[in-house]
Image (cartoon, rainbow, N blue to C red):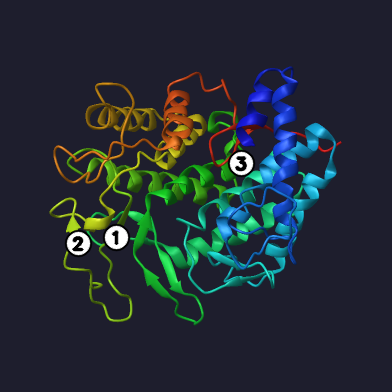
Amino acid sequence: MGGLLSAYHLTGETDTKLLHLADELGDRLAWSFDTETGIPPETAQLRPNGRPRAYLSSTAEVATLQLEFRYLAKLTGKQKYRKYVDRIMDVMFKAPKYDGLAPIYMDAMSGKFSGSEIRLGSRGDSYYEYLLKQWLQTRQSESAFHTEYEAAMEGVKKYLVTVSPSQKLTYVGEIQQATSDTPHFNPKMDHLVCFLAGNLALGATKGRALSDIPPAQLSARNREDLILARELADTCMHMYLDTKTGLSPELVYFRHIDPVTGKEAYFNKDDQLIQPEGDILARSNDRHSLLRPETVESLFVLWSITGEEKWREHGWRIFSAIEKWAKLPAGGYTSLRDVTAVPPPREDKMETFYVSETLKYLYLLFSDPGSVPLTHYVFNTEAHPLPQFNWD
């Protein structure tokens, strides 16, 4: 749907076939919202032959529909699309959280979060991304989204952000159990979490370039978020540059000193430091690369906002490593099985997001910063630019 809507907008809103297809798809997807709470199941219901059975749903998935359905409502005038996804957000806003942080599953029957595992990687990431972007999409007119976003980022800083002992890398870990005063911290970070660097920068400036913002207009909170954004992006680049191939594993662990015992946390016997004197560990099952987009997405956002050349230089290093190791002679690119080995074994499989997201963000990183201005567009979670608008 995001692709259809973005393509329709980029035709100057002249190719009505694209809008018709998006509208038809929206109608089909709408059957999935016919549950007790409006929370859809993880598998879409496309035919009206009975109510979908929804039990546990992924927090990220049910909170990553809103930009698309709200824009579809704006274009078609059919406010039912907006009501479907606003109902989901109402349920999520009312559900108890852990200092603004949402567990990675929702019980679609009760409308409450299930379990106590919290992370900004898989099953959690896009919830936080879309809190900010829903506020930006309608030109900062709906403050409830921004309030929830700021509360969530405070929770992230309080419980999830820490610094590794040797390389002093700022990273975002996970909470395995958020039911006590001292939640169990897990020093694990998915590559997916690297979206957060760009999101923090976007939230701090609302997409404006720093060169256009008088320093007095940046609050202490904004400056803090920009610092954290840069630090996280630097850590994500270490996940690339510290490996032999220059490409990041799917997920990593960081050396971590337990604040209670003062001892280094125990890791599995197959853990491998990607640098002998470093802090980043990659387990054998996690050393693959799907050529994910999150780091280059943040590089694009940081370049657009700061104008700092280092972000382009990092992007070129990533692109060069992809060209060296993942490009196939017959055409196309492939995922890699182990980025700590040279040459890395190949999978003979290319994920769709590599073209729709990774290459798109790399292209934009080296394009005119004003080609898709962040003050006028929000990118959905699949990198489709959607215009900001007013409801009136």
Disc 2 residue type (three-letter):
Asp
Residue beneath disc 1: 253
Q: Secondary structure at mark 2?
A: loop
Residue drawn at point x = 68 percent, y = 40 percent: 68
386 horizontally vs 358: left or right: right
Along the polypeptide, which appears first: circle 3 or circle 1?
A: 3
Where does the image place residue 364, in percent across and percent down from the top left? 48, 25
In the image, which disc is placed on residue 210? none
Q: Where, by quadrant of the figure, is residue 350 drawn?
A: top left
Q: Where, by quadrant of the figure, is residue 213 drawn?
A: top right
Residue drawn at point x = 17 percent, y = 58 percent: 272
Do tag 1 and tag 2 residues touch (Cβ < 8 Å)? yes
Q: How many other residues sit within 10 Å of disc 1, few (<14), some (14-19) or many (≥20)?
A: many
53 horizontally vs 363: left or right: right
Residue drawn at point x = 25 percent, y = 62 percent: 165
Q: Nearer the viewer, residue 252 or 370?
A: 252
Q: Secondary structure at mark 3?
A: helix
Q: Nearer the viewer, residue 56 or 340?
A: 56
Where does the image place residue 391, in percent across and percent down from the top left? 82, 38
Disc 3 residue type (three-letter):
Ala
Q: CA distance from mark 1 to mark 2?
A: 9 Å
Give above or below for 167 relative to 355: below
Residue beneath disc 2: 271
Residue beneath disc 3: 216
Along the polypeptide, which appears first: circle 2 or circle 3?
A: 3
Q: How many other residues sit within 10 Å of disc 2, few (<14), some (14-19) or many (≥20)?
A: some
